[in-house]
Each structure stands twice: as structure tokens, then as C-alpha cells.
Image (tube, helix red, strand yellow):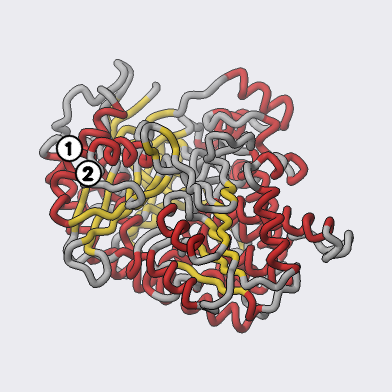
């Protein structure tokens, strides 16, 4: 059986892809959710079993994500040489020159988790490893709610105002690729600029346009880059640059040959890498980095990691905790509070200060959740209307929206309807400009979509008003152009995906006999870390009978279950269950689930995390 379709009052035509498809029913309104078994290369399964000693089940999980044995558990020794990044030697020389000659340095970053991680890496490398006085370094980040994305004019004004009569070196991280006009402005004022980034460049006259006013542009996205991995995050680019600066300072005699390496910063790069949703299957660098970073976090080598271990049930931080606990808190605070709140948490000198910053991050995240809940229902209704109209690309606009929830709500709409989505609201203190975040599905490249729209409609989406990569992006448009942009976005989605039907999809790792679901399997699945984009957690399908069911949660939106198969029974939980599809006692279901550990009172037990159920 290759695929199943979960549906409710299905109206879509030609939705089922194969004659072996069957129908499941869950609450998705009019739109079907396909539960599809991943394609698995049987030769790769055999290699993984033979070379890595994996069980059949675990080998099928890894093979379904296309990861070869040699790339499953890479070490730091397997990392690609940083010298292959374009301009990295020039960047290292410029930064080292500024360090030695006490030239003021500005570290300007994006304000999300990737940017905050990069900011912490650069700041600590400069001030602790290279002994630059803190007063000689300005750490700065844009507030997306107030000033938008990238190296904005407000950031440039703030940079120029700091020690305004002195020439400075500006290092950008996780931004800068689309900011030539502002970089040129800095250059004309006598400053030097080093761009470190991973985002794709604006396309001008059919070619990527690298900011020519920058003194160095270090990015794997450059068309002339010899670095073999274009999937790394901005924080890792910043980390690689600073490692080269260390070596340059040693070559100059400023640091001794035995100067400590920057390995204590790897955990920071690991967190930003996971949260920025870069590939965990097609990048051995990302897998090696995150594996090493998680080890540092669990060992608590920094005060912030010791606090993180206390915040996580079981005290064992995973990549899932990066993605769904630590990352969202950093992102939320950067949007509703200090854009560098995450960096302050990462750089906390002791646990009491780290605790202070974590409380601030967590409080901001709770505020973000309340805003999100208030906006989600409105956004989903608007998206539903557009899907009813046949739109393949959805663009939502809320007059009372909030930049802090753009990306999250866009992701929720994409998940619900299986279509690329943009979520706009008015720019801070402006009735004329809108800012938005975009998320996508397989087959639609966000940045390339922006480029195509901008090329033919520069008045609607001017170059420099957007940025991003394959999986996500952000843009600014005039409010008067909203409906035209909706049409252009829909057309571009249709152009990229062709005739392929778009619908919500849950990919599984196939059928699994209930007797194989045990603690050994969960431990083995845990060993496959790191999980993340393109290497999601394992999900299976099995048949169970409901032996117990009760409602849990403040608003009764979740259910706790006991599922039985023969004489075996399993604890299970299903979050955010619609009233129409609540499981019933005594009924047998086909269940889609992820086997996990449930940490409780110092112990861990097997628990099934349910994502869908079909009455048999």
C-alpha cells in the first residue's frame, strides 16, 4: 500500500495518486490529507544494516530520507574545508586587521535564532578569544516588527551614529546579500563591510547580484563558490569565518599558536542551524555540527545550556527541543522584545543571568502564543476562501496582524491546506507598507518565486524588498499592491509545481507490527539524531483498539489514550484533536503515530504521539 488519504467531505477531484490508495477520515474540512509511505531504496536499506548495524525498521527510516551510511553520523573531522568559501581569506584578513589595530567593529545580524546564534558567536570570538575590548564592539540587530528585514536603513543610521567620526568595520551575519544600497552608503562614509550570509542573492538581468560595495562577501550561495554545501545556515558561516580569523591572528603573531579553538561555540551554531530549517539530510556538515552541538548542550558547557537542560523534561536536550522550545522562544523575544535577547541568553556569564534571560524569552513566547491563537482562526478562514477560489498559492493579510507570528501562521496554513503561503500585516507605524513571511511545500522554491515576480513586476516587488531561500522567505509590499501580488504569487506557484495536485501530506515510514514498537526501537530512533528539515522524526502506521480515552489540557483540546494490540497496550497522546474525530472507547483504528519517550518523575516510558486515526 503506497498511500492513504485522510479526508472529510472530499470535494477535490483527481486527488488520489495511485489505484492502491484507500481513504482515511480526519477533520480537515473539505481538503484531504494524504498519508503517504515514503519511497525507500532497498539497496540503501541493506547498506545501512550492513555498515551501521541498524535494524530493518531504523534502516528503512534513514533510507526513506535518502541519507547514505557515511553521512548518517559524521564527525567534526568530516566537515568541508572552510577555505573553499569565497572571500573567507579576505574577510579573515579584514577582521584580523581591525582586531590588531583596535578599529571599532560592528556586528550586525538578523534577529531570528540563526541571527542571534551568529551574533553570539561573533561577539564571544571577538571579546573573549581575541581580547577585543567590549567597548570596541557594537552588537546590533534589526527589529523586524519596527524596521523590517535585512540591513535596513534604521540599522545603517544606528551604525553611522555610533562613534560617528571613526572608520569602522561592519560584519553582517545571516543577512547582507540583498542590501547593496545600504552597504554602498556605509562604504561612501568610509567604512568597510564584510558580509557573511547564506541566503540567495537578488537576481538582476538573469544573474545573481552580489553586493559589489562590500569588501568581502562570504556565502555558499555565491555562484563562484567552491564550497560543496549550499545548505548550511548563516550562523555556521559566521562560525567558519571566525575560525579563520583566529588562524589569521596566529599567523600575524597576535595570538599564540596554542590559542584556544572556537569549539565551545559549536552548540550555538547547532541551535541556529536546526531552527533555521536548513537540510538535515543533504548536508553532512549540518548533521556533524548539530550532533557535536547537542553533545555540548547536554554536557552543559555554557550556563545557558545548563538552564536549557533544566527546562527540558528528562534533562536531555534534543534537536526537537531546539526546534520547538528554545528556537521559538528566541524568535518570539526578538519580535516582541529585544532583537538580541537570544544572544544575551547564549552569552550569559552565569546561570542566574541565564535564568533571567530565559524567563524573559519564555514570557515573550507565551505572549506570542496568545497573539497567535487570536490570529490563527481569522487567518485560516481567509486561507480557506482562497483555496475555495482555486488559488494554489495563498496570501493572507490581517489588518491587526503581528510580525511576531507571521512565520508561524504561514506554516500552519501551509500545513493545513498543503499550499505555499504568505502572511502579511501592516509594517510598524505604517499604513501603506506590509511585511510578510512565507512558507512552502515540496516543489515550490520561495526565493526563486520572488525573483520571477520581481523580474516582470519590479514596481510590485522591487529588488531588495525580499529575501529568503528554498523553504522560507520574507517580503515587503505596498498595501495597494496586495491583490495584484496575490495573483502573481498564485501564478508563480502554478508555474513551478505544474499539474501536480497540492494537498496536505503526512509522510510515514510505513506499516509497523505493534509488537515491534518497544523501548529498544525508541532508543534506536533516538540514536539517529539530529532530526530536522528533510530528516523528520519517524512515523508509522499500526492497528490498535482504544482501551481507554480521556480529555486533557486546559481547554480540553487533547486526548490521552491507552491503545491495545493483542495482550500488549501502549500509552498514547493526541494533541489538538477536533471534536468530530475524537477516538471512541472500544473502537479499532489505523493509527498514524511517532514512538517517543515520555519523561515523568525522573523516569522515561514509551509513548505514542498520535497524528491521525482512522476507524477500521
Residue at image coords 38%, 41%? 447
User: Which dot marks residue 483?
Assistant: none
Is 336 above or below relative to 590?
below
Percent x, y for residue 466?
34, 50
Percent x, y for residue 109?
51, 62
Horizontal side of residue 152 vs 307, given as left or right: left
Quadrant containing the N terminus is top left
SS under mark 1: loop
How far, Cα to Cα, is label 2 from label 1? 6 Å
Q: From this viewpoint, is residue 240 visible? A: yes
Percent x, y for residue 307?
61, 73
* Residue behind mark 1: 391
* Residue behind mark 2: 394
Is 327 above or below relative to 483?
below
For the residues bearing labels 2 and 1, Cβ distance under 8 angstroms = yes
Q: From this viewpoint, is residue 569 visible? A: no
Q: Residues within 10 Å of mark 1 (few under 14, many from 20)?
A: many
Which of 215/430 is in front? 215
Residue at image coords 50%, 47%? 212
SS under mark 2: strand
Is 171 above or below relative to 224?
below
Disc count in the image? 2
Q: Residues within 10 Å of mark 2 (few under 14, many from 20)?
A: many
Residue at image coords 37%, 46%? 546
Which of 177/274 is in front? 177
Which of 504/80 is in front? 80
Amino acid at each position: 500500500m503506497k498511500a492513504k488519504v485522510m479526508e472529510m467531505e472530499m470535494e477535490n477531484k483527481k486527488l488520489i495518486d495511485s489505484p492502491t490508495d484507500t481513504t482515511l477520515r480526519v477533520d480537515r474540512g473539505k481538503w484531504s490529507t494524504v498519508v503517504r509511505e515514503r519511497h525507500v531504496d532497498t539497496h540503501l536499506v541493506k547498506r545501512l544494516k550492513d555498515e551501521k548495524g541498524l535494524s530493518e525498521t531504523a534502516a528503512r527510516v534513514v533510507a526513506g530520507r535518502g541519507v547514505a551510511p557515511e553521512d548518517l553520523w559524521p564527525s567534526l573531522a568530516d566537515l568541508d574545508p572552510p577555505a573553499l568559501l569565497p572571500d573567507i581569506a579576505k574577510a579573515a584578513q579584514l577582521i584580523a586587521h581591525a582586531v590588531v589595530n583596535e578599529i571599532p567593529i560592528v556586528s550586525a545580524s538578523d534577529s531570528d535564532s540563526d541571527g542571534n546564534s551568529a551574533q553570539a558567536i561573533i561577539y564571544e570570538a571577538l571579546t573573549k578569544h581575541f581580547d577585543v575590548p567590549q567597548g570596541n564592539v557594537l552588537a546590533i540587530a534589526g527589529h523586524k516588527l519596527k524596521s523590517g528585514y535585512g540591513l535596513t536603513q534604521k540599522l545603517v543610521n544606528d551604525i553611522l551614529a555610533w562613534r560617528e567620526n571613526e572608520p569602522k568595520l561592519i560584519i553582517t551575519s545571516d543577512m547582507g546579500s540583498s542590501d547593496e544600497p545600504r552597504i554602498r552608503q556605509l562604504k561612501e562614509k568610509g567604512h568597510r563591510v564584510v558580509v557573511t550570509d547564506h541566503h540567495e542573492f537578488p537576481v538582476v538581468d538573469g544573474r545573481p547580484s552580489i553586493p559589489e560595495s562590500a569588501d568581502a562577501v562570504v556565502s555558499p550561495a555565491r555562484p563562484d563558490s567552491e564550497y560543496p554545501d549550499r545548505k548550511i545556515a548563516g550562523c555556521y558561516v559566521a562560525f567558519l569565518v571566525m575560525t579563520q580569523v583566529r588562524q589569521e591572528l596566529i599567523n600575524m603573531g597576535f595570538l599564540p599558536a596554542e590559542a584556544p579553538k572556537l569549539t565551545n561555540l559549536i552548540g550555538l551554531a547547532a541551535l541556529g542551524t536546526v531552527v533555521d530549517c536548513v537540510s538535515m539530510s543533504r548536508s553532512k556538515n549540518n548533521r556533524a555540527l548539530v550532533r557535536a552541538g547537542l553533545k555540548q548542550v547536554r554536557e552543559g558547557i555554557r550556563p545557558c545550556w545548563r538552564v536549557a537542560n533544566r527546562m527540558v523534561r528528562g534533562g536531555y536536550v534534543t534537536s526537537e527541543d531546539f526546534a520547538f522550545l528554545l528556537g521559538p522562544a528566541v524568535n518570539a523575544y526578538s519580535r516582541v522584545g529585544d532583537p538580541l535577547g537570544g544572544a544575551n541568553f547564549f552569552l550569559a556569564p552565569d546561570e542566574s543571568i541565564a535564568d533571567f534571560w530565559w524567563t524573559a524569552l519564555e514570557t515573550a513566547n507565551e505572549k506570542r502564543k496568545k497573539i497567535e491563537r487570536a490570529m490563527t482562526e481569522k487567518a485560516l478562514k481567509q486561507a480557506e476562501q482562497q483555496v475555495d477560489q482555486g488559488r494554489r498559492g495563498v496570501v493572507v493579510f490581517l489588518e491587526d496582524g503581528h510580525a511576531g507570528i507571521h512565520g508561524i501562521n504561514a506554516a500552519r496554513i501551509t500545513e493545513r491546506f498543503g499550499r505555499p503561503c504568505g502572511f502579511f500585516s501592516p509594517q510598524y507605524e505604517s499604513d501603506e507598507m506590509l511585511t510578510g513571511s512565507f512558507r512552502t511545500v515540496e516543489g515550490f522554491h520561495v526565493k526563486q518565486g520572488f525573483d520571477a515576480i520581481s523580474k516582470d513586476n519590479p514596481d510590485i516587488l522591487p529588488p531588495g524588498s525580499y529575501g529568503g531561500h528554498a523553504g522560507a522567505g520574507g517580503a515587503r509590499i505596498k498595501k495597494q499592491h496586495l491583490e495584484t501580488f496575490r495573483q502573481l504569487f498564485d501564478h508563480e506557484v502554478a508555474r513551478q509545481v505544474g499539474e501536480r495536485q497540492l494537498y496536505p501530506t503526512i509522510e510515514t515510514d510505513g506499516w509497523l507490527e505493534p509488537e515491534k514498537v518497544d523501548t529498544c526501537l525508541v532508543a534506536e530512533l533516538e540514536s539517529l539524531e539530529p532530526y530536522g528539515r528533510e530528516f523528520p522524526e519517524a512515523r508509522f502506521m499500526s492497528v490498535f483498539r482504544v482501551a481507554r480515552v480521556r480529555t486533557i489540557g486546559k481547554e480540553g483540546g487533547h486526548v490521552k489514550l491507552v491503545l491495545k494490540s493483542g495482550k500488549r497496550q501502549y500509552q498514547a497522546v493526541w494533541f489538538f484533536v477536533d471534536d468530530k474525530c475524537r477516538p471512541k472507547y472500544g473502537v479499532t483504528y489505523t493509527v498514524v503515530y511517532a514512538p517517543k519517550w515520555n519523561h515523568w518523575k525522573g523516569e522515561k516510558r514509551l509513548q505514542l504521539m498520535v497524528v491521525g486515526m482512522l476507524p477500521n
